[in-house]
Image (cartoon, grey):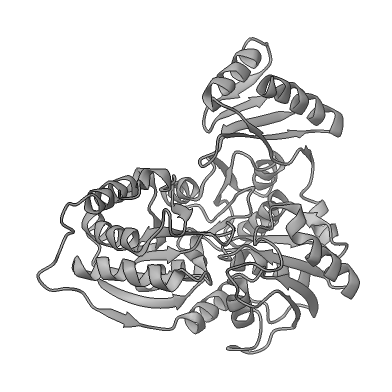
Amino acid sequence: MAPQLSEFVKAYDVRGLVGSQLTPEVMEAIGAAAVAVTGERSWAVGHDMRDSGPGFAAAFARGATAAGADVIEAGLCSTDMLYYIAGARDVAGAMFTASHNPAEYNGLKMCLPAARPIGLDTGLAEIRDKAQAILDGEPAPTAETPGTVTAEEFLGGYAAYMRGLVDLSGIRPLRIVVDAGNGMGGHTVPAVLGDELLPALPIEIDPLYFELDGTFPNHEANPLEPANIVDLQARVKATGADLGLAFDGDADRCFVVDADGEPVTPSAITALIATRELDRHPGSIICHNLICSKAVPEIIAEHGGRPVRTRVGHSYIKSVMAEEHAVFGGEHSGHYYFRDFWFADTGMLAAMHVLAAVGGSEKTLADLASEFVRYVPSGEINSKVTDAHAKIDEVADHYEAQSGVETDRVDGLTVGLADGSWANLRPSNTEPLLRLNVEGPDQASMERLRDEILHIVRN
């Protein structure tokens, strides 16, 4: 029996277990379906360091070329490097990665030319259904003249492009620790921030886990989990580094710790980069998802920008940014999006902005970040539930009956109280979980709202 693609085709990508869900046959069918559904006849295909990546990329290319598309075989890539290729060459893209997921997983992110996202609402559902039909026995689309496969190296072009977006040549000397988590940051950081391909910068890099290894022998490549940045924090403090950077598996997200090893929240990084972009582009629109700190839209407005609130998820924020021609966008999860980068997300460019801000100032990162922290966050709290939407309705009924409370359903449920506290409760796209984020003007108000909602959710 053919695998059921609906089990592992998610809201904006494919993510599943290698062997039982993801096979070369599945990827070949998706390659053929992607060409048939989108009509795109030029594709760049890349993969991360997972063992199954090269085989899956080759299988996708077989399906795509049989359907008449020409394929550029890009080889080892970070996800943002694949976006660079899609933007610079104006071709569609297929990136084989499971990001921060454990070693037994792989996945696929696709985009249209200019790195425009492909999600369930923008073609992924149709690609899924077409591929499923092929796997169930329908003949795959076949062109009279098959496409070609051409191998090409893009690391140097990517590095040069990134260097051109943020000038780091004139900053004061910095010592930084970079934890690549055995992921693709180990491939791209030496090229962009080091001197392997380009002139040296005034940055001394202490590399941590740069060896590409899809089994993740040291820790999972998910810096959002505190346990996975412990080694980075310790190395930063032990060496007296100015700051530390941690990338996830496919290096499209970047997390930052200061010289004391303390994490700097993605909301603070979003606000910091927003002020830098507004200095360059006064009055511009900046997007932020609805889980970012309330400080983010406040700071954007105070610096003359116009904040625009979006749903959580890269396909949503990219679409809004393109519609609004926003100069920058940030998410609580460490995804950062740039108009100069085809509205796509890149951990590398965010890291470069942080380095430019610290290196262009006599202040420490902690001092700079403190200017952008105004409220107390709970962090994301997950609760396992049997019916997520019923629980959301239950919480909504509780608060909508109260005066002075504002609610909306832009993404899950957002509740705002008169004391300035707010909370967002939304279902996971992949698991039977509700994700709760709460923020308050002080610890006590945050905890009060947090505990009240958790009481409803968990009872």
Report if residue 83 is visible in the image. Answer: yes
Instruction: Tell me residue 194's x, y (percent).
Output: 66, 83
| Drawn side of residue 363 relative to residue 199, left or right | right
Residue, far front: 1
User: Does residue 428 lie above or below 371 as drawn?
Assistant: above
**Quarter of the image where one finds residue 294:** top right
User: Does residue 234 lie above or below 202 as drawn?
Assistant: above
**Quarter occupied by the C terminus:** top right
Instruction: Tell me residue 447's x, y (percent).
Output: 81, 29
Instruction: Tell me residue 142's x, y (percent).
Output: 14, 64
Tell me what residue is drawn at x 58 percent, y 89 percent: 197
| Drawn side of residue 261 relative to residue 4, left or right | right
User: Does residue 58 lie above or below 248 as drawn?
Assistant: below
Work out whether residue 115 or residue 138 is closer to the camera in this orientation and state it: 138
Tell me what residue is drawn at x 77 percent, y 67 percent: 244
Work out whether residue 86 or residue 160 is closer to the camera in this orientation and state it: 86
Count of residue discs? 0
| Drawn side of residue 209 relative to residue 120, left or right | right
| Drawn side of residue 277 relative to residue 65, left or right | right
Report if residue 420 is visible in the image. Answer: no
Work out whether residue 51 or residue 87 is closer to the camera in this orientation and state it: 51
Instruction: Tell me residue 285's x, y (percent).
Output: 54, 49
